[in-house]
Amino acid sequence: MPALLEWQRDFARAVLSVEPALVREELGITGDPGARLAIYRNNYLGNLVRALTLNFPAVQRLVGSDFFAAAAQEFISQYPPATARLDDYGQAFGQFLTHFAPAAALRYLPDVARLEWAVSRALHASEAAGLEVSGLAALDEAAMAEVRFVPQPSLTLLRLDTPADAIWRAVLDQDEAAMAAVDLSGGAVHVLIERSQGAVQVRRLTSAAWHLTQRLCAGEPLHAVLASRDELLTGDEINALLADHLAHARFIDIVVPNAEQSA
Amino acid sequence: MTSTAYQTSPIPAAAGIGLRFAHHEIVTATRPAVPWFEVHAENYFGHGKLRHILEAVRRDYPLSLHGVGLSLGSADGLDRLHLERLTALARAIEPGLISEHLSWSRAGGQYLADLLPLPMTEEALDLVCRHVQQAQDALGRAILIENPSTYLQLEHSTLPEWVFLRELAARTGCGILCDVNNIFVSASNHGWDPQQYLAGLPGAAIGEFHLAGHAVRTLEDGSLMRIDDHGAHVAPAVWALYEQALERFGPRPTLIEWDTAIPEFDVLLDEAALAAQRLRARERASHARAA
């Protein structure tokens, strides 16, 4: 009999494989190994489908539980989880649905999944105090030009090809009128997902405000962002946008490269 | 034989309930009269709303942390990040008890999302002892290890499961979470004698009982298989075995678990009341004997 390490890898392959006959003879299972391994395989799939249902409730309601389970099982076989923290499982589900042929007619489905992943992330993210405005005010002009912002861990910015935010809200609220009013021909929407005062918020931004915020969150220096900003935003609008970000604690820290070197 | 090892535990020898997401609202809003709750640790590794709910429950009730993903039986070694997260949660919540399973769920970098069976060998015993010690060192306290439900036996096993558990407790100082439903399920699936199983466990190490429902299926080869799905009322035969375990080991914290087809909270309260009746009967019997 192989040592435990090899035995466990073989056992894992037998549980994960659709045709476990390949390895199961080596495992030393008494009785009918196929039927017994199938119980573990069913438990494995059932537990993971349940975890994905918790993380993607709107996708599940949109397609129904049978379709969802079939899609989830295909996803599980392509992207098995690496850790036992299952609230953190399913990052690639939106991308997977883009290529999942049975869902091709539901153009908005991958967007709803991407939005739900961001919502789930916002739900579970660690908490950090917002940036103190006094810290910014203390910077001199040179430092102010170089300053970069560190975003809240709960913050995600998504550009969605479909109004998936409206669909997500309507399906979870079971609001048929709102669902009927969804206009799929309206073009892309730009959303910001965050946890604010304990609750997850999904807000739409204008394309210009979203791009500026995206660049700041990606760590571009403030002056570079402002120098090449979208002409659609006036100075007043930028000030209002930054004030709104600070008021909602969307940045938790600043990095000033020169100050760090001199410190 | 009665134990004194866990009398200082803040988890009382009363009938608690496994708290699931579906009942967060009713529990935080109505604060039902439940002596203690147990939660699956991995569900609260994140922050935000769920963690706040757990903290609120912890303020009002004794709380037990029950891990399902540490994979103490993995020959790949313990997942250090997982143990760090468990330790951080335990530090934050200060649970009355921390428990895990005699099983494995990780191999080759993949998480297998179930409690998989270990060969009952000296090699596996050495490995699980090492990992339990590592976990206890990190957590700074003894943990309880739960006997699993299993659906297959292995030709290379050399130790009965109860001997494995007894050795594990003796070598590491860990306690035993005696899942009565799992003993019944595994004994039925493999033709073991559940009385022999109970008799083989060291009474002083028993720190908690679990009770749950299970399903019954017939396999293609005609054999009957009981599946521990936590999706039904506790079976009458499991209640009987629980009474025998109480008789043998004395009252211990006892948990009602229900994880699939989760019913209304009242159903769990009723189920816990059935366990509480039996705990009280056992208390009365021991007082009568002492008098």
Image (cartoon, coloured by chain):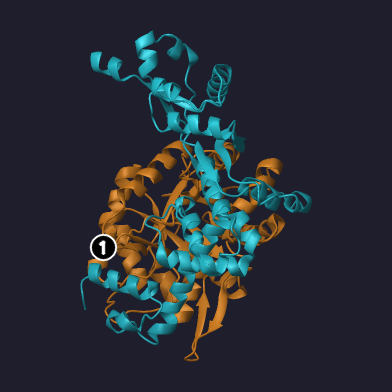
Chain colours: A cyan, B orange
> What amino acid type is highlighted by mark number 1?
Ala
Residue at the extreme front of the image, as rendered = A231
Q: What residue is rendered at 58% in x and 57% in y?
A: A109
* Left or right placement of residue B178 versus residue B111 in this view: right
Q: What residue is rendered at 33% in x and 47% in y?
A: B81
Percent coordinates x, y for residue B285 in the rendering: 59, 61
Residue A57, by quadrant, is bottom right
Question: Crowding at label 1, few (<14), some or many (≥20) Cα neighbours within 10 Å?
Answer: many
- In this rendered view, identify the residue nearer to me: A260 or A227: A227
- In this rendered view, identify the residue nearer to me: A131 or B233: A131
Percent coordinates x, y for residue A29 in the rendering: 34, 82
Q: Is residue B41 visible?
A: yes
Which residue corresponds to mark 1? Answer: B75
Percent coordinates x, y for residue B134 in the rendering: 28, 49
Q: What residue is rendered at 52% in x and 63% in y?
A: A49
* Left or right placement of residue A91 versus residue B28 in this view: left
* Left or right placement of residue A121 versus residue B81 in this view: right
Give the quarter of the figure containing the N terminus of chain B: bottom left
- Is residue B191 depicted above or below B275 in this figure? below
